[in-house]
Amino acid sequence: QVQLVESGGGLVQPGGSLRLSCAASRSIDSMYVMGWYRQAPGQQRNLVATITSGGTTTYADSVKGRFTISRDNAKNTVYLQMNSLKADDTAVYYCNGKALIIGNTRDYWGQGTQVTVYS
């Protein structure tokens, strides 16, 4: 089992920045992809960004050019740098890790961290 713990959420004004961290309880070397998702009230959980074990990244169109995902395998941590924040970015942000176990993908989730962009 791997536990993922997010941190770094909070209140920020439009145009501001936050950096989210996702710390894993053990090595993330086995996670072939890690990502951030977000869920606003009354909405489904949506993909924000992913990063593979090889460092390939993908982003939702709504955050391209503003958010940057990175991973530090030595620290077992994934980050999401969020710049130029907008009110629409307000949501609970969840960290996700995917591992292949006996040929099947297993998902791991954190408990979420709240990001609120207010004016």
Image: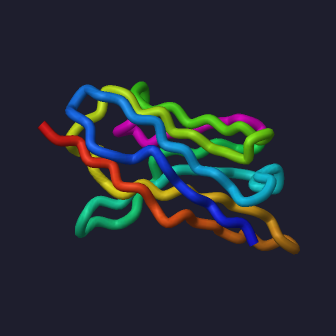
The quarter of the picture where residue 21 lies is: top right
Residue visible at 23% across and 42% down in the picture: 117
Colouring of the image: rainbow
Residue furthest out toward the right? 102
Residue 3, image quadrant? bottom right
Q: Residue at x 31, y 27 (%)?
A: 84
The image shows a total of numbered marks equal to 0
Percent of width and height locating residue 98: 69, 61
The answer to whether 97 appears left or right of 45 in the picture is right
Magenta stretch containing residue 8, yes or no?
no
Determine the residue positioned at 42% across, 25% down. Answer: 65
Q: Nearer the viewer, residue 40 or 77?
A: 77
Residue 32 is situated, as x and y percent measured from the top left of the image, at 75, 52
Q: Main secondary structure of the magenta part?
A: loop
User: Is 111 on the left or on the right of 91, as rendered?
Assistant: right
User: Is 60 covered by the magenta stretch?
Assistant: yes
Is 93 above or below relative to 118? Answer: below
Q: In which quadrant is the N terminus drawn?
A: bottom right
* Highlighted range, magenta: 54-63
- The residue at the point 75 percent across, 62 percent down is 99
Single out the residue that lies furthest toward the left: 119
Q: Position of residue 112 (x, y in %)?
A: 45, 61
The image position of residue 119, as x and y in percent, is 12, 36
Q: Nearer the viewer, residue 109 or 8?
A: 8
**Towards the viewer: 105 or 116:** 116
